[in-house]
Image (cartoon, grey):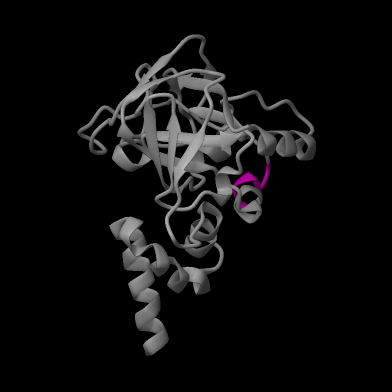
Amino acid sequence: MAAIASVNLGRPLPNPYKGTRTTGIGKEPTAGPVEVRDPGRKTSGLGSGLVGDFIGDGKHHGGNDQAVYAFQREDLDVWESQLGRELPNGFFGENLTTTGIDVNEARIGERWRIGELELEVTCPRIPCSTFRGWVGEKGWAKQFTAAARPGAYLKVVTPGQIQAGDVIEVIERPDHDVTITLLFRATTTDRDLLPQLLAAEAYLDDETLDLVRKKQTMTLD
């Protein structure tokens, strides 16, 4: 059964890994329900979709299309084994630590219902300097990127409360095969995959569509 293992919130911490002075990457599980709502635009909105969660770099994180970040416990367990260290829920900066669902195989535009809350899968997480420094493993960004299991950002379609133990129900899957992993690989390590993303054109952000169109132009030339 697909479910929420924990809901994780971040508080402001010093950020020595980026120009921003603070970060909310160090998220920790919280007890009780958390309100989730559309945070609005990057820079001018509320940042995170979760009330009580902190985002330090509002230019690159948070906002409508990155309101909620989900990462599966099963992948944290794999990384624990590979890195030889404990990785508690929330350590990768995820708001939702999930179980029983392959987040990386979620299709772009797929919708989840969690209680009264409805979320839509938008895009993968791209590792940044804060994430690299926070984990503190040599070559971490390259290692994480090569695995191509980055977890998923989601936007809020219908606001509501969420808490550990809530069931995740996939209520809509678009008729295409563009998954989080495919989108991640196409925009990071294998640009030859970019044309395949057009199958999900209606769900792609402008920046990704620009990459696809530039790739098409280069191919025609």
Residue 161, relative to residue 132: is it above or below?
above
Magenta portion: prevailing SS class = helix
| Picture coordinates of residue 8, whole percent (x, y) | 50, 21
- The residue depicted at 48 percent of the width and 9 percent of the height is 32
Question: Is residue 20 in sight in this rendering?
Answer: no
Magenta residue span: 138-142
User: Residue visible at 51% across and 74% down?
Assistant: 192
Residue 17 percent location from the top left of the image:
49, 35
Q: Quadrant of the C terminus?
A: bottom left
Location of the N terminus by quadrant is: top right
* Residue 47: in magenta span: no
Q: Determine the residue positioned at 79% across, 36% down.
A: 81
Residue 98, by quadrant, is: top right
- Residue 216: x and y in percent read 38, 79
Q: Is residue 96 left or right of residue 53?
A: right
Instruction: In the rendered view, tell whether residue 126 sits above or below residue 163.
Output: below
Extreme residue in the top direction: 32
**Number of numbered markers:** 0
Residue 41 in sight:
yes
Towards the viewer: 181 or 102: 102
Tell me where residue 143 appears, x and y as whole percent.
Answer: 66, 50
Q: Is residue 114 above or below residue 191?
A: above
**Residue at left offset 28%, top offset 31%:** 38
The residue at the far left in this view is 44
Q: Is residue 141 magenta?
A: yes
- Going by the picture, which residue comes out furthest to the front? 171
